[in-house]
């Protein structure tokens, strides 16, 4: 079996499996899909996490400042 015969065989298999039709169906289904919604719970959770992160950064900075002040005095 040479390369051109393999190519024809693969094309025939693809046609027999209906790849063209399934690709069209998939694109139509994707366009009808709902867009993701932002949850209020998720936004609150992200806000709390952001406040906690800023608090930790502030606390570490304050401790570093106190340590440097203690070492220099």
Image (tube, grey):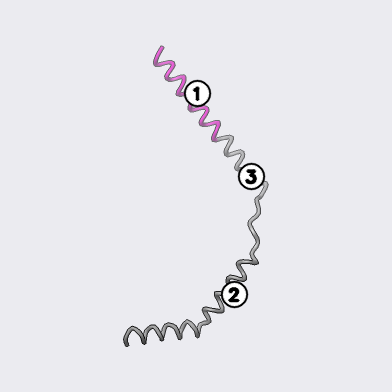
Q: Quadrant of residue 71?
A: top left
- Residue 49 picture location, percent across and down: 58, 39
Query: Label 2, on which residue?
Result: 25
- Label 2: which secondary element: helix
Distance between the Cα atoms at labels 1 and 3? 29 Å
Distance between the Cα atoms at labels 2 and 1? 59 Å
Residue at image point 55% right, 31% down: 55
Query: Label 1, on which residue?
Result: 62
In front: label 2 or label 3: 2
- Residue 44 picture location, percent across and down: 64, 42
Query: Label 3, on which residue?
Result: 43
Main secondary structure type of the part rendered in magenta: helix
Q: How many marks?
A: 3
Please state if 72 lies on the left or on the right of 36 as rendered: left
- Label 1: which secondary element: helix
Residue at image point 50% right, 85% down: 16
Crowdedness near tag 2: few (<14), some (14–19) or many (≥20) residues, C-alpha within 10 Å = few
- Dot 2 and dot 1 residues touching (CB under 8 Å): no
Q: Quadrant of residue 46?
A: top right
Please state if 2 lies on the left or on the right of 69 as rendered: left
The vertical placement of 70 against 19, above or below, is above
Which residues lie in the magenta part? Answer: 53-73
The vertical placement of 28 against 16, above or below, is above
Q: Quadrant of the C terminus?
A: top left
Residue at image point 51% right, 82% down: 17
- Dot 1 and dot 3 residues touching (CB under 8 Å): no
Residue at image point 65% right, 67% down: 32
Mark 2 and mark 3 lie on one chain; the one further toward the N terminus is 2
């Amino acid at each position: 079996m040479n390369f051109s015969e393999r190519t024809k065989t693969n094309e025939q298999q693809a046609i027999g499996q209906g790849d063209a039709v399934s690709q069209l169906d998939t694109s139509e289904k994707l366009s009808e899909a709902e867009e993701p919604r932002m949850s209020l719970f998720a936004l609150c959770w992200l806000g709390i996490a952001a406040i906690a992160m800023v608090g930790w950064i502030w606390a570490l900075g304050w401790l570093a400042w106190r340590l440097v002040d203690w070492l220099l005095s």
